[in-house]
């Protein structure tokens, strides 16, 4: 084994790429440099606590490291979070060389945006789509199957036992993982579990497909009957391991809107049979309602009374953060401009919130805030002799 753990990880990558088994992975966990890197990944602005790392390594040497149980309402234990990050770094090097190019979860430089671009850039001539979820609320992730899959790549009993203990503690507890709990390691384990699905699609059915976590879409060139046959073959393959979510797995013609990862895609008839990706109207309406802006359909504006205990600047930054998040999520959409209506509703809601807090009117609040920057809503904050201007976000401020 190389004295430099990162060189050893590169060795793992090359071995895995050649479809060979890896051995002696557990001892790599004794290298401090690996833990320091994991610490920096998780807490980039915090000084590394050497004692915590030394304690973890010592317990690993004696085989006494134990994970704390993860419950839905609790946070992941600090030391366990470090452990998950180190295991993630190791397994990523092992599995990235063999993951499908059409899998977009827990792989470097891939995400939900690359999944959508995969469809938009490379799908031509598709007539029907099979889309849905693997697993679901009633389906379990079978840990023995996952451990067996890991065992096909890794020949190290102690390393696999450590992952077994991590699974037992709840790091991968069902398909709908709590977003506050989810970590890179959980996503990677899920991707390893579903890698067999990608392999089956590519080598046995040889059709176009894209998968992000347990959400997938398959493009079929042919009749609806041929799409049904493919759906049947997929269901048969998954029966003993994963199961399809029957109520969420549908066959839809490419000329209709097909939901995928919060977007919709359909055939763009005006541009040589290319694919158009859109923001679903219902998604924006739900976002506005959930965040308390009001009703986007009839444009009823609401103040957010729960925010009035914050400062005016904090309220403005709360709105900006929410709007920037949804705009970044939907930046690939061909109808990106429809977010303008949402941004305007949010602006009116912000004014109502500040007016409610000040016991004033939206009109008076707007007039006062628009004095600073050519009619834009602004708040001026004085900090240590400096003047900081915070401007309410507009869609045109964000580069698509």
Image: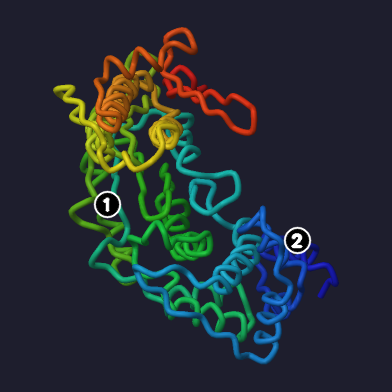
Residue 223 visible (yes or no): no
Whole-percent x and y of residue 290?
25, 41
Question: Quick one: label 1 or label 2, which is nearer the N terminus?
Answer: 2
Whole-percent x and y of residue 88?
59, 64
Task: Kindly indicate the quadrant of the structure image that contains residue 325.
Answer: top left
Closer mark to the observer between disc 1 and disc 2: 2
Residue located 23% across and 37% down the image: 286
| Residue 181, label in figure | none
> For the image shown, how many numbered marks are present on the structure?
2
Residue 48 visible (yes or no): yes
Colouring scheme, one of rainbow, by chain, secondary structure, one colour:
rainbow
**Left or right of residue 388, residue 193 in this image:** left
Whole-percent x and y of residue 136?
27, 61
Q: Is residue 63 above or below residue 356?
A: below
Residue located 59% across and 24% down the image: 387
Residue located 42% across and 30% down the image: 327
Whole-percent x and y of residue 213?
42, 54
User: Could you tell me how far apart the alpha carbons at marks 1 and 2 are, in whole angstroms?
Assistant: 39 Å
Looking at the image, the residue that sits furthest to the top is 374
- Look at mark 1 in the image and give the residue it sits on: 231
Task: Kindly indicate the quadrant of the structure image that contains residue 109.
Answer: top right
- Look at mark 2 in the image and give the residue it sits on: 10
**Left or right of residue 227, residue 1 in this image:** right
**Left or right of residue 186, residue 229 in this image:** left
Pick the residue in front: 44 or 139: 44
């Amino acid at each position: 084994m190389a004295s430099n753990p990162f060189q050893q990880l590169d060795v793992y990558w090359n071995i895995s790429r050649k479809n060979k088994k890896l051995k002696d992975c557990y001892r790599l966990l004794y290298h401090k440099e690996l833990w320091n890197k994991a610490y920096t990944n998780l807490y980039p602005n915090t000084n590394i606590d050497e004692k915590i790392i030394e304690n973890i390594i010592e317990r690993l040497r004696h085989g006494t490291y134990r994970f704390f149980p993860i419950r839905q309402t609790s946070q992941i234990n600090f030391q366990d979070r470090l452990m998950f990050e180190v295991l993630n770094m190791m397994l990523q090097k092992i599995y990235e060389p063999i993951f499908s190019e059409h899998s977009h979860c827990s792989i470097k430089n891939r995400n939900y945006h690359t999944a959508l671009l995969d469809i938009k850039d490379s799908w031509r001539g598709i007539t029907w789509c099979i889309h849905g979820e693997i697993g679901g609320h009633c389906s379990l992730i079978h840990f023995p199957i996952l451990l067996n899959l890991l065992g096909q790549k890794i020949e190290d009993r102690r390393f696999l036992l450590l992952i077994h203990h991590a699974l037992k503690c709840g790091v991968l507890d069902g398909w709908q993982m709590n977003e506050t709990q989810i970590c890179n390691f959980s996503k990677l384990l899920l991707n390893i579990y579903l890698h067999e699905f990608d392999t089956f699609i590519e080598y046995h059915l040889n059709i176009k497909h894209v998968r992000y976590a347990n959400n997938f879409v398959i493009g079929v060139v042919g009749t609806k009957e041929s799409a049904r046959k493919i759906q049947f073959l997929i269901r048969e393959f998954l029966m003993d391991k994963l199961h399809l979510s029957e109520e969420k797995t549908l066959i839809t013609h490419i000329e209709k809107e097909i939901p995928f990862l919060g977007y919709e895609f359909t055939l763009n008839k005006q541009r040589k049979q290319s694919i158009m990706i859109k923001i679903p109207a219902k998604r924006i309406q739900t976002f506005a309602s959930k965040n308390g802006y009001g009703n986007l359909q009839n444009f009823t504006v609401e103040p957010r009374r729960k925010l009035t205990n914050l400062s005016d600047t904090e309220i403005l930054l709360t709105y900006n953060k929410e709007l920037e998040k949804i705009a970044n999520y939907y930046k690939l959409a061909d109808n990106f401009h429809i977010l303008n209506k949402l941004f305007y509703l949010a602006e009116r809601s912000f004014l109502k919130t500040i007016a409610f807090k000040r016991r004033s009117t939206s009109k008076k609040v707007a007039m006062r805030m628009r004095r600073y920057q050519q009619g834009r809503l602004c708040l001026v904050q004085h900090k240590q002799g400096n003047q900081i201007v915070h401007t309410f976000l507009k869609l045109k401020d964000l580069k698509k």
